[in-house]
Image (cartoon, coloured by chain):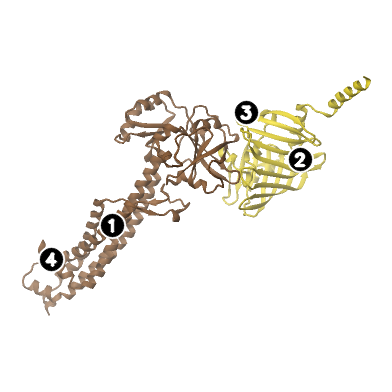
């Protein structure tokens, strides 16, 4: 084995310039493969974190009329009274870290000069703080949240012409459909990095939301955060018996909310794969071309070896090792480059906030794109490059052993 | 003493003669607000901070349950048509070539993008059925203070300033339950045709924005004896 590798190295560096040019597309292809998948893995991971930490929690109890695709939030359709039995179950369950009620409705936020459509969430400060990370991302830091106060996403604020401590008006419709409004004082700004929150969401006290909507003790959902070690499915199984008594209610998990993220992720992986495949195909053609040129240059050498009794598999092995070595070298350099870039993406990330601005990219991320750093994926990408080298050199090597010896030595 | 008695009697007499009770005022206002068998040609201007949209409208009103509106021309190319038949409302989108039933949340949207909602147009109930009304009076107006008494009232609280001479509103103010002024409607001018007063110019202001004004000017008003039912059909809407 060592002999064959040494021989392959010796042969490919007979023409350094050609080998270097052959390596380039492989290096580029493997680097791109590693960086692209690092970025997609990172986007996927951060998107799901942003979804669970700020929007969906681990799962929610909702009305059977609730749909994640329904953009208009009609409290009359999705509001429900939480049965005491469910509250008791959640309080006593060892799998539940915390749970919190939410009231969600749409409205207009006005400073008297501008009016913006927003999502208004009525929250219970203490339980919301335990279930979501949203309240850790407020400026200034807040310890309590009272009736008559409002927290708004930082991107909402840039459209309004007000100062901290100003009064806003929230205009919406009550559950009966009556046009009404209430005044709220700005308590702070929320900056989560999740565009769904930062661009369009405001938070008010749950009792204020209830009083405004005239919905009594109804809620839009109960968001549940499970303990880290708890499996989602174990909890759902344990809860099944209680929930089955209330046919008007159902569970939706973060995975249901992440359907769009997953669809976008797989579409992006698919399109990236095509791009990378093209690069590696170019690399493979380059390797095949280099081996073929090498064979033509060493025609007499191959003929002599065969005339002296070298079996076909030795000739085949020699050229396959050359192809594999070029593939490995290109992949190795690509792995190092890709690995370094992935490490940078993982630790620091790329700030796209000035590029993205208000564009919806499909992921619940708007500022810094972080990658993942996965040694196994990097090694797999390297192996893939080596494999491309072997496949690409197979055809030219076959030509070397198929040629007639007498014609070669003429 | 005699002077005092004469003064007292004349005061009582003048109150009886010139001041009306609440029900009488409301009866007159509700009656005057309902127009029948009329064709309008109107212009509507919708202004906000960024844009101004102009449109020419043709309106057929048989009664409060039969209304047809057509956008004849508009600065943004919108040529929608609108039909209110009984309690249903339909919007014909020329670009899509089909009509949609306006229901649910769509009722809360602005009529053709204006400050007036479809719900404002669809309201058929008598004011007294929807609001608890208190009437106060100043020199020029009867001021109707209306507080919602039903869950599905369009507004929580509104004030209507009724002109004493014609028993029609000059101004309407929409308030929130916390008493914040949210919208204002002005009817700046009326035209009298065959003893019926028709609004000439209506201005609607959304006070949640610095500049959001909808102005409707009625240019031609044709009062008919009877309007054909054919205008108020889906066939006519989708023609």
**Residue at the bottom extreme, as displayed:** A410
Q: How would you rate the neighbour count of disc 4 (Cα within 10 Å): few for under 14, some for 14-19, many for 20 or more?
A: few
Sequence order check, earlier mark of 4 and 1: 4
Which chain does the numbered disc 3 sit on? Answer: B
State the separation of the CA atoms marked 4 and 3. Answer: 91 Å
Circle 2 SS class: loop
State the separation of the CA atoms marked 2 and 1. Answer: 83 Å
> Is residue A391 shown to the viewer in this render?
no
Marker disc for residue B226: 2
| Residue carrying label 4 | A6
Dots 2 and 1: beta carbons under 8 Å?
A: no
Give the chain ID for the yellow colour: B
Name the residue at 41% across, 40% down.
Answer: A136
Circle 1 SS class: helix
A61 or A390, nearer to the observer:
A61
Residue A1 percent location from the top left of the image: 10, 61
| Residue carrying label 3 | B150
């Amino acid at each position: 084995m060592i002999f064959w590798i040494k021989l392959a190295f010796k042969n490919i560096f007979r023409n350094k310039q050609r080998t270097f040019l052959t390596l380039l597309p492989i290096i580029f292809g493997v680097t791109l493969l590693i960086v692209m998948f690092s970025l997609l893995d990172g986007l996927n991971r951060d998107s799901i974190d942003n979804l669970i930490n700020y929007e969906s929690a681990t799962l929610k109890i909702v009305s059977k009329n609730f749909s994640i695709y329904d953009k208009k939030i009609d409290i009359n359709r999705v509001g429900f009274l939480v049965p005491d039995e469910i509250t008791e179950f959640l309080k006593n369950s060892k799998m539940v870290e915390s749970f919190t009620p939410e009231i969600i409705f749409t409205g207009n936020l006005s400073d008297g000069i501008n009016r913006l459509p927003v999502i208004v969430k009525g929250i219970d400060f203490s339980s919301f703080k335990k279930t979501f990370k949203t309240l850790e991302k407020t400026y200034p830091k807040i310890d309590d949240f009272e009736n008559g106060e409002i927290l708004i996403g930082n991107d909402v604020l840039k459209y309004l012409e007000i100062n901290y401590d100003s009064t806003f008006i929230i205009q919406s419709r009550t559950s009966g459909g009556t046009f009404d409004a209430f005044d709220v004082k700005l308590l702070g700004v929320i900056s989560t990095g999740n565009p769904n929150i930062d661009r369009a969401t405001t938070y008010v006290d749950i009792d204020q939301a209830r009083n405004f909507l005239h919905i009594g003790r109804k809620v839009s959902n109960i968001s549940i955060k499970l303990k880290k070690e708890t499996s989602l499915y174990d909890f759902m199984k344990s809860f099944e018996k209680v929930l089955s008594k209330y046919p008007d209610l159902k569970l939706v998990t973060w995975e249901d909310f992440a359907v769009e993220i997953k669809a976008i992720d797989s579409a992006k992986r698919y399109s990236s794969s095509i791009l990378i495949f093209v690069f590696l195909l170019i690399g493979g053609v380059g390797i095949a071309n280099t081996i073929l040129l090498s064979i033509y240059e060493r025609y007499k050498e191959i003929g002599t070896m065969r005339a002296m009794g070298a079996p076909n598999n030795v000739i085949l092995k020699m050229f396959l090792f050359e192809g594999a070595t070029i593939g490995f070298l290109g992949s190795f350099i690509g792995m190092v480059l890709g690995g370094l870039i992935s490490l940078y993406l993982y630790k620091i990330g790329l700030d796209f906030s000035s590029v993205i601005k208000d564009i919806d990219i499909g992921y619940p991320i708007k500022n810094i794109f972080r990658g993942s750093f996965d040694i196994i994926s990097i090694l797999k990408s390297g192996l893939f490059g080596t494999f491309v080298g072997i496949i690409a050199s197979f055809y030219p090597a076959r030509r070397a052993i198929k040629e007639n010896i007498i014609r070669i030595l003429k | 003493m005699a002077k005092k008695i004469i003064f007292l009697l004349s005061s009582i007499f003048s109150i009886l003669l010139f001041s009306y009770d609440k029900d009488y005022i409301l009866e007159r206002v509700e009656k005057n607000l309902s127009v029948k068998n009329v064709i309008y040609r109107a212009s509507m201007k919708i202004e906000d901070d960024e844009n101004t949209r102009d449109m020419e409208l043709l309106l057929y009103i048989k009664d409060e349950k039969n209304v047809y509106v057509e956008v004849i021309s508009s600065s943004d190319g919108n040529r929608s048509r609108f039909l209110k038949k009984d309690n249903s409302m339909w919007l014909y989108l020329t670009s899509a070539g089909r009509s949609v039933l306006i229901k649910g949340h769509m009722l809360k949207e602005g009529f053709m993008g204006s400050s007036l909602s479809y719900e404002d147009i669809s309201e058929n109930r008598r004011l007294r059925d929807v609001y608890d009304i208190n009437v106060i009076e100043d020199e020029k107006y009867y001021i109707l203070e209306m507080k919602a008494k039903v869950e599905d009232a369009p507004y929580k609280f509104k004030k209507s300033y009724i002109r004493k001479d014609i028993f029609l509103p000059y101004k309407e103010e929409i308030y929130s339950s916390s008493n914040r002024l949210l919208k204002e409607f002005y009817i700046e001018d009326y035209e009298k045709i065959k003893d019926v007063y028709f609004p000439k110019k209506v201005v609607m202001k959304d006070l949640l924005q610095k500049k959001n004004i909808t102005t409707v000017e009625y240019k031609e008003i044709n009062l008919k004896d009877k309007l054909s039912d054919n205008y108020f059909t889906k066939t006519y809407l989708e023609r």
